[in-house]
Image: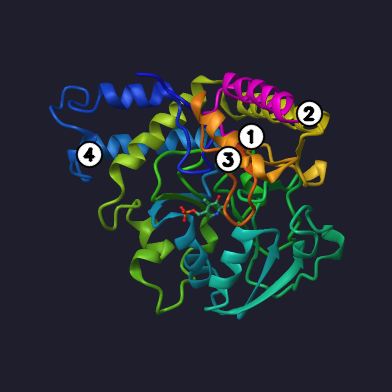
Amino acid sequence: MSRAFNFCAGPATLPEPVLKQAQEEMLDWRGTGMSVMEMSHRSDEFVAIAEEAERDLRELAEIPEDYAVLFMQGGASSQFSTIPLNLLGDKTSADYVNTGIWSKKAIAEARRYGDVNVVASSEDSGFTTVPDPSGWRTRPDAAYLHYTPNETIGGLEFDFVPDSGDVPLVADMSSTILSRPLDVTRYGLIYAGAQKNIGPSGLVVVILRKDLLGKARKETPTMMNYQVIADNGSMYNTPATYSWYLAGLVFKWLKAQGGLEAMAERNERKARKLYRFIDDNDFYANPIEPRFRSRMNVPFTLADEALNRAFLEGAEARGLLNLKGHRSVGGMRASLYNAMPEAGVDALIDYMAEFAKEHG
Ligand SMILES: *Cc1c(COP(=O)(O)O)cnc(C)c1O
């Protein structure tokens, strides 16, 4: 068996030691005679697994006690409606920043529930930059300000945390969470679909300030009500137990790597290497304003689009997988999440250099 370097944007590569541990524990979790998948979510064993995962996440991200951590289902996309249903409260409007495809999806869904004010958009530039916050048309009576710190498809990442004043800041961190240290206290709510930097898809982690609980609209589905989920320790119904367990293994792995500072350093190095190579080579290009280039998702184009197929086939033959860009953007995209080793980036650069030499 050999493991490829998988550059998929999500579901994404997981740390090999995590997969090995899951494999070892698959049939018999620590002498219980069963797989975690087969355990009651109410069992002492699973409750311990769940609590340990939350503790490790709190430690990693330095999440204060006045924040709840929820392990919900339905992916990040379900939060696009869960957030307005819970946070609009007695207000009618919310502010959104539009920096790409995921912002747009969040905006479209929120419009079903309230008056959405798009405070700024970089759509005119093809989402190659982040609008200057000095020009954002925010409203002081907004229920919250929503933004997408890392646009997974466009490869655009904020290099600052917006200042939303007293308005709670809400962030879709699906593709950037745990890639570097973060100051949770700047946010009212953080959410992240698990399949990029946390674990298997379907699970979505929500971190929210407890004073934002209890504001859900009456018609909010019970399963989407943060208060209900919080009161029940994310076990109002059967949670995604196996995904939760795997997320816990990933958190342990992150701690063993030296935590988020160490990840940030490694991620910075990986991304810098690849962008430098792209910039130094006429055959490849990345359209994003350098300051806002994503360290997690690196889109790039070839000088001749007709070579895309040959590029992908050659990559695949070397075990460099899933480099095809999103269908809406085209070109290529290399996702360099926490679990992508530096050797994977080196192998990619070697291949790109060779391909450019041959076809450039
Ligand atoms: C992947 C992703 C989503 C969608 O996640 P699902 O779990 O598929 O719903 C939303 N936002 C961002 C920024 C993403 O990267």
Horizontal side of residue 225 vs 210, given as left or right: left
Residue found at the far right of this picture: 134
Q: Is residue 298 visible?
A: no
The stretch drawn in magenta includes residue 346: yes
Q: Is residue 55 above or below residue 141?
A: above
Q: Residue at 23% of width from left, 35% of height from top? A: 36
Main SS of residues in magenta? helix
Mark positioned earlier in the residue sequence (3 or 2): 2
Please name which of the two marks, 2 or 4, marks the residue nearer to the observer: 2
Tell me the amino acid under the disc marked 2: Arg
- Is mark 2 in CB contact (under 8 Å) with mark 4? no
Q: Which residue is mark 3?
A: 309
Please name which of the two marks, 4 or 3, marks the residue nearer to the observer: 3
Please name which of the two marks, 1 or 2, marks the residue nearer to the observer: 2
Query: Within 8 Å of ligand 1, the CB of disc 1?
Result: no
Give residue 170's position: percent from left, percent from top: 61, 58
User: Magenta residues, as a range?
Assistant: 335-360
Q: Which residue is mark 4?
A: 37
Alpha-carbon span between mark 1 and mark 4: 30 Å
Helix, strand or loop at disc 1? loop
